[in-house]
Image: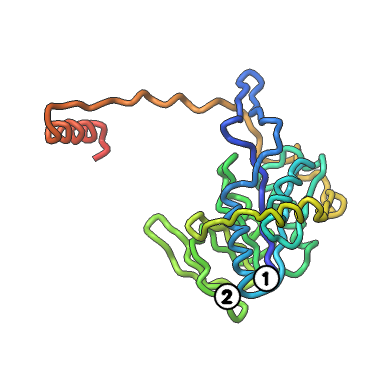
Amino acid sequence: MNIVVLIKQVPEIELVKVDQSAGEVVLPSGPGVVNPFDEYAVEEALRLKEKHGGKVTVITVGPEKTESALRACLALGIDEAIMVTDPLFDKSDPQAVARILAAGLKKIGEFDLVLSGKQAIDDDAAQVPPAVAAILGLPQAMFVKKIDSLDGGKAVVWRTTEEGYDVVEVTLPAVLSVVKEINEPRLPSLKGKMTAKKAPVTKWSAADLGIDGTGVGAGSYTKTTKVTPPPPRQKGEMIEGETPEEIADKLYNKLKENQVL
């Protein structure tokens, strides 16, 4: 069972600033962290490897500093880490990133399963996993909460919906994005951290993947026209009363007044 996990290095969200005059999001200078949702994909890949054998590879797109995210995954027991990095890819939108990752998967060659987190916490787009599947012509199931079985070249998974979940069967190889209900990510061991420091990281450029500037980086088809910080939270209201019943009545009337009920 050869599994590839798509990960993204994201900034620490509380340190992100917005420069309205320049119309830009100002990211912190630090290396960032592994996208939290991707940690569940890494954990699920490791569990599947422990059960079925095989190999787990992580791949990401980003500048040189994204190597720290790959090493964090290596510390958990990942077998191989690949960083696709090139100045040509700077400012790629989610669809462009999907094209780059799809090219990377083609270069990897054979694999049985592609996993990723449901979305990245910096843009919340949730576009990359389904776009990768579409580009490669692979079956896909998004927002998976459980992988029920992997047998006979097929996977049975529980896909979350607004009403609950669907049980679906996909033919392998397939692309799955996962939600946090699927598992509890492990922590790295000291031995794992030491091993990760010395482990090799494969680096591919645009030329290695046969990609030119069309539709990626500055050539991405999505353009940002305006950037503003989120509005401040409204001040809360304390509902008071002589008795719990009175407070409950006031709360009910307030919710009804605001058409919450």
Residue 29's image quarter?
Answer: top right
Residue drawn 78% across the image and 67% down it? 109
Q: Nearer the viewer, residue 179 or 255?
A: 179
Q: Which residue type does callout 1 highlight?
A: Asp
Residue with the most extreme top position = 21
Q: How is the image coloured?
A: rainbow
Residue 153's image quarter?
Answer: bottom right
The residue identified by callout 2 is 150
Quadrant in which the N terminus is drawn? bottom right
Picture coordinates of residue 63 (x, y %)?
77, 41
Q: Relative to 87, is 188 above or below? A: below
Q: Which residue type does callout 2 highlight?
A: Leu
Q: Are marks 2 and 1 in contact (CB under 8 Å)?
A: yes
Picture coordinates of residue 227 (x, y %)?
59, 27
Q: Nearer the viewer, residue 169 or 232?
A: 232
In the displayed structure image, the side of residue 98 where residue 158 appears, left or right: left
Picture coordinates of residue 176 (x, y %)?
58, 62
In the displayed structure image, the side of residue 259 where residue 60 appears, left or right: right
Picture coordinates of residue 14 (x, y %)?
56, 32
Q: Nearer the viewer, residue 148 or 210?
A: 148
Q: Residues within 10 Å of mark 2 (few under 14, many from 20)?
A: some
Give the number of marks. Answer: 2
- Cα gap from disc 2 to disc 1, whole angstroms: 10 Å
Label 2: element kind? strand
The numbered mark at residue 112 is 1
Residue drawn 12% across the image and 35% down it? 245
